[in-house]
Amino acid sequence: MTFDASVLFRSNLPAPAAAPFKAFPAFNFIGGHNDSASIPVAALTDAATRIIAQEGASLATYGLNSGPQGYLPLREFIAGWMKESAGMNDTADEVLITSGSLQALDLVNQLLLEPGEIVVAEEATYGGALTRLAKLGVPYLGVRLDQDGIDMAHLQEILEAQKQAGKPAKFIYTIPTVQNPTGGVMPVARRQELLDLAARYDCLIFEDDCYADLLWDGARPPALRAMDAEAAQSEGRANRVIYCGSFSKSVAPALRIGFIMADWPVLAQILPLKTDAGTGALDQMVLAEFCKDHFADHLVTLRARLKAKCDTTVQALEENFGTAAEFTAPLGGIFIWVTLPDAVNTTQLATAAAKEGIAINPGAEWTVDGPKNVNRMRLCFGNPEADQIREGIARLAVICHREFGVPERISNRSQP
């Protein structure tokens, strides 16, 4: 008699994994990876040695004697860094450490949303945020973007229409600084417009700021949460912005350390939802020890490395795709958002490219209206080295020409 466990699986599961993981593709332009050379291994090793010797005994208790919000020295560092870099005045008591920003998204969604409620998201945005909303049965409405971020006139139209329909938006999800996938940065004046509209229509803002430390010039604008703080205090109300950040892009993705910053009444209700018994304690300890002495200098080095890779990617796209690839060079981060001619379907292109060791993110997976964006793709330049970027994009252009006739010319030679 045979036993088949699959007959006991619950219904409506996602598609299963295709196969056990073997290796990354040769030309890896997906995900939010860094490269191995950008990881500050020596400094992390020293930090781990010191902190385990000093505080290793605290691993005997859940929460490291810091409580369920996370390791206190790390929360204190975050509060101080956010004050210095983004103008925020939150204390360590208004910081919750999470297992990456994905857990932050899940917790905020659990806090705020019920099936059928409405969220407004940027028309091109983080795919993980969209899949989580869909899983919850929460419709999301896409607001137009331009080079400065959210189109505020369109946002007002959406908010007003939802108000008139008796289904007001619950919150606005935005990535205002180094937007994913476009790489744009919302100016301060437009940030104020966003706050004004949120106040007028009485909705929250969920500010995802995971890439803000990677601006090439290091001069990030004030966070939306920082800008709302003064008005909130003078009006005697709560801050209407819930903020999330991450060390995945600024230090190491595999650390899985993110954080939420919000007023205490918000965090007090989120804490019962965080049922994992705490984010990895040793990771928090090592990160805090590393950051206090090395974080700022590490960012300077990392930004320069990523900027060089970005320049290489721009050059490779121009050389191999020519005018067939439209994009705006990002102001920071690890992504370039590329628009190809309408004839190209990047979902099909991704399948063809994968067979030849090239991984790309199709545009349909990173947009609210996927079918209208099948000619777009997101390329992550954080992981591949310069030679891999050049060769991978050259090969991708050949595949795209073979599949769709785009670009018409490869390496300045007409194709037969």
Image: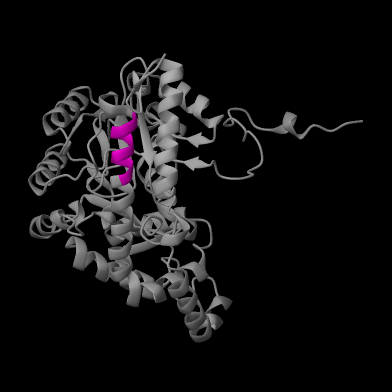
Is 57 above or below relative to 308?
below
User: At x 27% / y 64%, what residue is drawn?
Assistant: 300
Give x and y (percent) for residue 188.
Answer: 10, 49
User: At x 12% / y 60%, what residue is drawn?
Assistant: 233
User: In the picture, which quadrant includes the C terminus?
Assistant: top left
Give x and y (percent) for residue 414.
Answer: 35, 18
Q: Of 411 and 81, which appears nearest the observer?
A: 411
Is 116 above or below relative to 173?
above
Q: Residue furthest front?
A: 413
Q: Residue furthest bottom?
A: 54
Q: Of 69 and 381, which appears nearest the observer?
A: 381
Give the main secondary structure, helix, strand or loop, of the magenta stretch: helix
Q: Of 248 and 69, which appears nearest the observer?
A: 248
Give x and y (percent) for residue 130.
Answer: 39, 34
Is 339 above or below relative to 83?
above
Q: Which residues fall within the magenta stretch?
A: 312-320
Does the magenta run of residues contain 315? yes
Q: Is residue 118 among the parts visible in the rendering?
A: no
- Horizontal side of 98 relative to 263 (left or right) equals right
Q: Quadrant of residue 138?
A: top left
Does the magenta run of residues contain 190? no
Give x and y (percent) for residue 205.
Answer: 24, 45
Q: Of 327 and 130, which appears nearest the observer?
A: 327
- Horizontal side of 143 relative to 335 (left or right) equals left
Is 345 above or below relative to 180?
above
- Horizontal side of 146 relative to 349 (left or right) equals left
User: In the picture, which quadrant includes the N terminus?
Assistant: top right
User: At x 10% / y 59%, what residue is drawn?
Assistant: 230
Q: Is residue 49 among the parts visible in the rendering?
A: yes
